[in-house]
Amino acid sequence: IWFACACMPGMQAAVASTSDAKLYWGDNFYTQIERSDTDGANPEVVVNVIANGPSLFIDSVNGHLYWDHFNGSTISRIYRSNLDGSNTTLINESSDRFVGGITLDYANNKLYWTNYDSDEILRSNLDGSSIETVISSGLTTPEGITIDPVENKLYWVDGGRDWIRRSDLDGGNVETVL
């Protein structure tokens, strides 16, 4: 689940985790990822990201947190850690600046993300290897992204057009849903 929230100054990208019953969010003001119980009790810092607030994805199956980190100038990175912030691993580093969403395809062990600097949707293996462009044309500011594992469809928000679009997992058969 991904949504933006204006609940606190700087809050961005809140995600609920079923594996540890926690709520995670990015905080642009303090430049960190935080979590609490789902009722808001026991807040704590999970990761200091030292840059703009991230896109977040909770991998409840494997107990991982994925997020992006933009250094404010030219480099964007995607990281993975355990849900408590330990064992942080750099998954991807790119000169494209803005990751707008992250999701996982568990069946095929793929990581997908949107890039609204280059207007692309990309994917890689979960370890960041074998990066490939899934969709590179017809996108305007692609953001939030998710996968329907039953229908094998990729969904995303086309922020420049205020559309929700979908495609096959390989980028074929793009269509506007809303």
Image (cartoon, rainbow, N blue to C red):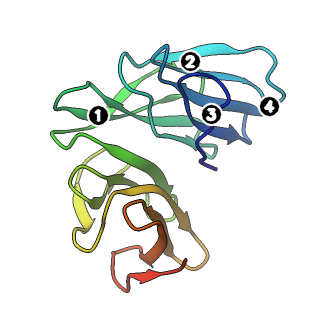
- Report which residue position mark 4 lands on: 38
Name which of mark 2 and mark 3 comes first in the sequence: 3
Q: Is residue 36 left or right of residue 154?
A: right
**Measuring 82% from the left and 18% from the top, which residue is drawn there?**
41
**Label 3 neighbourhood size at 10 Å, few (<14), some (14-19), many (20+)?**
few
Please give the residue where the numbered disc 3 appears in the rendered image.
Answer: 6
The dot on residue 77 is: 1
Image mark count: 4
For disc 2, the marked residue is: 46
Residue at coordinates 70% horizontally, 32% vertically from top-left? 23
Is residue 110 among the parts visible in the rendering? no
Mark 2: amino acid: Val
Disc nearer the start of the sequence (4/3): 3
Which picture quadrant has residue 50? top left
Q: Mark 1 or mark 4: which comes first in sequence?
A: 4
Query: Cα distance, mark 2 to mark 1?
Result: 17 Å
Structural distance between the alpha carbons of marks 3 and 1: 25 Å
